[in-house]
Amino acid sequence: MKLYSTNNPNSFVDLKEAVLKGLPDDNGLFMPTSIPTLPDGFISDIKQRTLPEIAFEVCKNLFDGYIVEADLSTIVENAINFPAPLVPLSKDINVLELFHGPSMAFKDFGARFMGQLMGYFNKGESQELNILVATSGDTGGAVAAGFLDAPGINVTILYPSGKVSDIQEKQLTTLGKNITALEIDGTFDDCQRMVKQAFLDKDLCSQMRLASANSINIARLIPQTFYYFEAYKQLEDHTLPIVFSIPSGNFGNLTAGVFAHKMGLPVQQFLAATNINDIIPKYLDTGIYSPKSSTETISNAMDVGDPSNYKRLVDIFKQEGSTWNNMKELLTGYSYTDEATIEGIKEVYSKYGYVIDPHAAIGYLALQKYLKSHEANGIILETAHYAKFKPTMDKALDFEAPVPERLAALSDKEKIAHSMSNSFDEFKTFLLAK
């Protein structure tokens, strides 16, 4: 498997370098030279396959023999060992629950797979590998759980102070061992900028082995394709066009869906559902990409003002002619305020007796609007367990939202985090001192 940078399609690396490096030297993002179509019969026979079998087949075709099949099978089996059930709410609205992994968020798919893959590639290395990750919510907890006690690997997680939920913060600040949390005085975009700058700092890279665990790393993106196929498998009715409504922040999840589509998954439309950080919906409306500082909302994991994976989306769609026109054919953007999000949570519970989190509530609102003018079978990605956002849920519902035991147990654990400004120089000094 060969990959190139979105900033330089003529410079290639193999999968190991792309995964362990995370970010190209030119500040682009790694992309595979081709996204293969899955073999004939894969889609038609998909109901006979388990989720790990689907994941293995996707990886086998993407990796093209780079990892021997026995090792690849072990990586997949160790990483994807929890379900992703599809819950029908009505004849045309379904919820794909992606919160059944260790950290109760969809990012467990990417973090666990990446942890297994990095561990595989890191065998025999004498120098420790330092994973840097910025989080706006769930990434931090998933990466912490996925890499805890991984031999030869240290993890540093940057998160914006006061802008993640209490439970999310506890998930990434209470593990200790090889997991270090940095509480940054700034926004998620500041955290992301600091991580990117670290990879471009030649002095730092000459002294430390660095890798990224954000969705800028291709190893995070690939496993997020698995559950799109799993959702399709569980649908009873394949006669209507299929639409995925995706709560979106850094747009890794939506980009993974586009990968799945290019591999042969029959999808008519992807709905890019955002909060008021609506950079991509505005781009889809106007053709103008205008990043800006992110604004804090109750759907905090989507508070991103300059989505990294926009580069990958542009790279995919520019290969087929007019980038903007091609993107608009497959993607439709919607954005919603906090007030609308609260109403969405209330409506889903009132109509269907289902408790939906603030992120998926935005996905629900987008799908509802789309279905007013289209006949389709809709799937909302439920990206995290609602209990992670308890204050918001308690405000939206007429009862106190119950908290699963594994999340409730976090309340008694001590938070251990290093406070830091959003200065890269301070961050660099901290890393070198470690």
Image: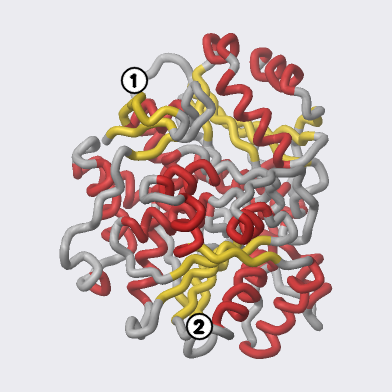
**First of labels 1, 2 by sequence position:** 1
Residue 122 x/y as whole percent: 38, 26
Which residue in the rendered view is the most extreme toward the left?
40
User: Which residue corresponds to the image point at 53% horizontal and 27% vertical from the top-left?
Assistant: 27
Task: Say whether residue 246 is visible.
Answer: yes
Left or right: residue 328 compared with residue 32: right
Quadrant containing the N terminus is top left
User: Which residue corresponds to the image point at 54% horizontal and 85% vertical from the top-left?
Assistant: 89
In the image shown, does 302 or 370 lie closer to the viewer?
A: 370
In the image shown, does 177 or 371 lie closer to the viewer?
A: 371
Left or right: residue 361 compared with residue 44: right
Q: In this view, does 323 lie above or below 360?
A: above
> Which residue was labeled with disc 1?
124
Residue 312 x/y as whole percent: 47, 44
Residue 416 x/y as whole percent: 75, 36
> Which residue was labeled with disc 2?
374
User: Which residue corresponds to the image point at 53% horizontal and 52% vertical from the top-left?
Assistant: 107
